Image: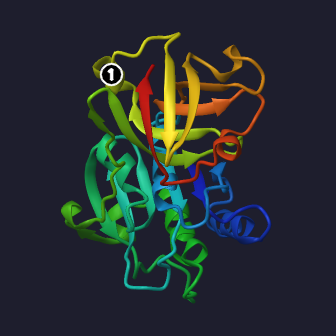
């Protein structure tokens, strides 16, 4: 029995998450389902893709990732299933699965939009229940993937990318790519870029946005600065993050998803 890991932007107010699990359990009563999160910002495909990519390595080989952030539900976008070296990914073909798929290595891709294993009646607004859930359930039972969908060219799937920061004359032009529930602000500066930047623990960094400026200490954790102070550190996502000790950096600095900022070493 394969483990099913479930990620969505459904939130926790409505019955959508529970209904999807009900469909899976109706098909495979022994299915083990882990909720990765249902708190992805509504319609934030890139945020969902980032969370999926950075979380997958902590799950065993053979895990089925069922991911639904699907503002295009009911349109011509395809429902797909991707077999990678280590996982099976199920969700909409809107880029949500692409970061993990490309990192882990794509082996096979299937169009499951018209699968005979989907529910008999398919809603125009709830493919998580009617298509993705039954396919994940049957995949967890070990049905051959070719029976669940139609093989398609892996090069045809929609791919999204994390925008790359620009480093010029001592300044890094960065972008906010995720804000977590604590208000910590994730930038697109990956830890592999730090050697090029020459930043060291203890350095002071200046963050600026449209004339406003803040100073943070480059450290290993927000807990190592004073309460209410700003810290810059490599997050568990492996990107540079801006946080406030026992505070909300997004609110304090007024930073939101896709905001552009400039960072330089003082």
Q: Is 226 on the left or on the right of 129, as rendered?
A: right
Where is residue 197 drawn, in percent x and y?
33, 21
Q: Nearer the viewer, residue 223 or 202?
A: 202
Q: Position of residue 233 (x, y in %)?
A: 54, 24
Q: In x, y percent, where is residue 143? A: 43, 61
Task: Tell me which residue sits at (48%, 54%) in the image.
Answer: 258
Asked if residue 142 shows in the view, the reply is: no
Q: Residue farthest to the front?
A: 211
Return the residue nearer the eye: 99 or 258. 258
Describe the element under mark 1 as helix, strand or loop. helix
Can residue 245 be seen from the camera position used here? yes
Identified at 36% across, 69% down, the residue is: 147
Q: Using the image as rendered, state which of residue 180 and residue 50 is in the foreground.
A: 180
Q: In what quadrant of the picture does the C terminus appear?
A: top left
Observer-nearest of 83 and 10? 10
Residue 104 position (above or below residue 31): above
Residue under numbered circle 1: 197
The residue at 56%/16% (across/down) is: 219
Callout 1: 10 Å neighbours few (<14), some, many (20+)?
some
Measured as percent of width and height from the top left, residue 139 is found at: 47, 59
Task: Check the image and report above or below for 171 versus 157.
Answer: above
Q: Eyeballing the image, is 117 above or below 213?
A: below
Residue at horizontal 25%, vertical 50%? Answer: 107
* Badge count: 1
Q: What colouring style does the render use?
A: rainbow
Residue 229 falls in image quadrant: top right
């Amino acid at each position: 029995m394969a483990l099913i890991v479930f990620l969505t932007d459904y939130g926790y107010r409505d019955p959508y998450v529970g209904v999807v699990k009900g469909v899976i359990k109706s098909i495979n009563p022994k299915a083990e389902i882990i909720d990765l999160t249902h708190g992805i910002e509504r319609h934030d495909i890139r945020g969902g893709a980032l969370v999926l990519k950075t979380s997958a390595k902590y799950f065993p080989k053979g895990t089925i990732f069922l991911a639904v952030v699907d503002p295009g539900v009911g349109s011509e976008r395809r429902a797909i299933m991707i077999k990678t070296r280590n996982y099976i990914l199920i969700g909409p073909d809107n880029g949500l699965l692409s970061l993990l798929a490309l990192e882990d290595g794509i082996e096979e891709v299937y169009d499951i939009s018209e699968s005979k294993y989907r529910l008999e009646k398919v809603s125009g607004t709830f493919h998580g229940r009617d298509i993705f859930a039954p396919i994940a359930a049957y995949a967890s039972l070990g049905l051959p993937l070719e029976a669940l969908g139609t093989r398609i060219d892996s090069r045809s799937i929609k791919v999204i990318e994390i925008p790359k920061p620009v480093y010029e004359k001592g300044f890094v032009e960065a972008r906010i790519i995720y804000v977590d529930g604590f208000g910590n602000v994730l930038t697109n500066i990956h830890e592999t870029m730090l050697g090029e930047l020459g930043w060291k623990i203890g350095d002071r960094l200046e963050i600026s946005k449209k004339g406003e400026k803040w100073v943070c200490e480059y450290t290993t954790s927000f807990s190592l600065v004073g309460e209410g102070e700003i810290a810059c550190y490599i997050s568990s996502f492996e990107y540079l993050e801006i946080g406030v000790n026992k505070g909300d950096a997004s609110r304090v600095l007024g930073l939101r998803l896709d905001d552009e900022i400039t960072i330089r070493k003082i």
